[in-house]
Image (cartoon, rainbow, N blue to C red):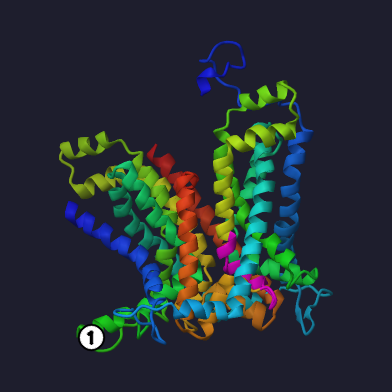
Amino acid sequence: MASIIPSDDGHGGAAPVRRRAAPGLIWFPLACVLPLVVLMLGFFLWPLLGAIVNSFHPYGLAGIDSAHWTLVNYRTLLDSFYLGVLWRTVRISFLISLITAVLAYPVAWYATRLRPTAQAYLLILYVSPWLVNVAVKAFGWTVLLSPRGLINRSLMSLGLVDSPLPLMFNETGVVIGLVHAHFMFVLLPLWAALGGIDRNLLWAASGLGATGPAVFRSIVLPLTLPALLAGMIINFTINMAAFATPALLGGSRVQVVSTLAYRINLIDLNWPLGAAMALVLLAVTLALVLAAQRLGTARREASA
Amino acid sequence: MRTGLKLFNGAMAVFMLAPLVIVVLISFTPEEYFALPTTRWSLRWYREVFHYPGFVDAFLLSLRLALLSAFVATGLTFLAVYALVRFELPGRKTLDGFFMSPLLVPAVVFGIAMLQFLNLHGLYNNFWGLAAAHIVIIVPFAARAIMAALHEVPHQLEWAAMSLGAGRLGTIWRITLPLAGRGVLAGFLFAFIISFDEVTTTIFITGPAYQTLPVRVYNYLTDQIDPTIAAVSSMLILMSFGLILVLDRIGGFKSLGR
């Protein structure tokens, strides 16, 4: 199709194509961008800024006491209970990203060796859990993992265990549920990166006597590290924010930041404290994401 | 080694599908509890769903909400992304980052901020407040798909139309949109399903009058459990897979890999 379109600069088809039209024109693109910008300023940035303001007000019986300013909400969060919940959330989220990375490598490796049509089916298989409702997925895991669930009943009727294994209503349940739910966020970048590796490199390495693990360590891992880190960062962020999965599979004993924030905001109705919690979660998430990106760039520069 | 790799991938496929398949199987049980149907299969729990107005109302609400949000988000995002792709707008990078930034804010954080914002401005327990939140959440997904689609449309065709006398909006409507149609449709479908299934932010801002279907399913699960929920879940799974197949057909998953 492109060949029948005359090139715009009159020098023939080989000349570089200028991508942008009418650079001088300004009112039209501005008018195009404006509605979305206004909407996002009003319903995204403003609510977030409002939460920052609310977190510096004290909690009054009527809700937010807007007449006074305080740091008491942030001081409350330094209590060992809240710090403990935050630490648990970070720890579980990181563990999930790590397990996902370890499981995703062999899947991506296998996938890149398949024919394109088979790859397309495999892609659907791994994307589909993400597009199925979270509550539905958690329900499916409940049927499988609960003390009287299918797995435990099968194991017991086979005589392999005497009492049900504690597969849910604890951190194990949360980890299983979230590894499943957020798997594609690590898998897809890794898949693309592995597909881009020149196979000759691998043959050359093994031809020169490198063993499988050595090839992985000195060729595959360095070449896929940026993609791996990018995937793990996204995976980590959404693990930190997960709500329904920890609430349904972790039970009341595994409090994470999101389930605790739900209680504070909607049951205790302590909005200033709830806002402070939201901002701490946002700050911790953004700080860890930035740190991971830094690490990624530093690594790339060191290896270049 | 190769057999090991195959076995491992087989196990991973089972891991991915098991919780979904089990839900569908159980929804056909004739029993009062979660049992795999063996000899007798029954549709009684599907009938039960339609006799429970909570689910039917919630489904209609979710459908209305997701259609409206996806429609508005796709429309506004298309215009904005068109401007970013085709023009030298000052601050292009910043705007692009701004449109993608909802991805960086954890859903709970946005839910809390929205809860307080909507309450303080009298929009709590209100359909439009809910819709505004959903639009913000789905903008990045629509933007990604539409941006990929617009890069594939040769801009010379737009120039040709304009030099023959078409206006700017007319050109977008009659030339760009049809050529970028598949990508825009993919953006719309992603936006629709993400809005339809959103739980984390929504649960903070649904008032009692506006419980979406996923929120109702969540509340039902924390409270009582019987195979009705398996039937509802199966229908949701069916809907997701239907959309996934359409998305795959129109090449919608290509924008995911980037």
Residue B55: x, y in percent?
A: 58, 76
Residue A250: x, y in percent?
A: 45, 78
Which image quadrant for residue A207? top left
> Which residue position holds label 1?
A157
Which amino acid type corresponds to the residue marked 1 in the rendered image? Ser
Q: In the rendered structure, which segment of residues is drawn in magenta?
A: B195-210
What residue is shown at x 62% (from left), y 60% (from top)? Answer: B66
Assign a secondary structure to mark 1: helix
Residue B179: x, y in percent?
A: 58, 35
Looking at the image, residue A296 sits to the left or right of residue A266; the answer is: left
Residue A248 seen in this snapshot? no
Residue A238: x, y in percent?
A: 51, 62
**Subunit ID for the residue under disc 1:** A
Residue farthest along the top direction in this orientation = A11
Looking at the image, residue A37 sits to the left or right of residue B153; the answer is: right
Looking at the image, residue B94 sits to the left or right of residue A92; the answer is: right
- Residues B245 and A260: in front is B245
Magenta span includes A297:
no
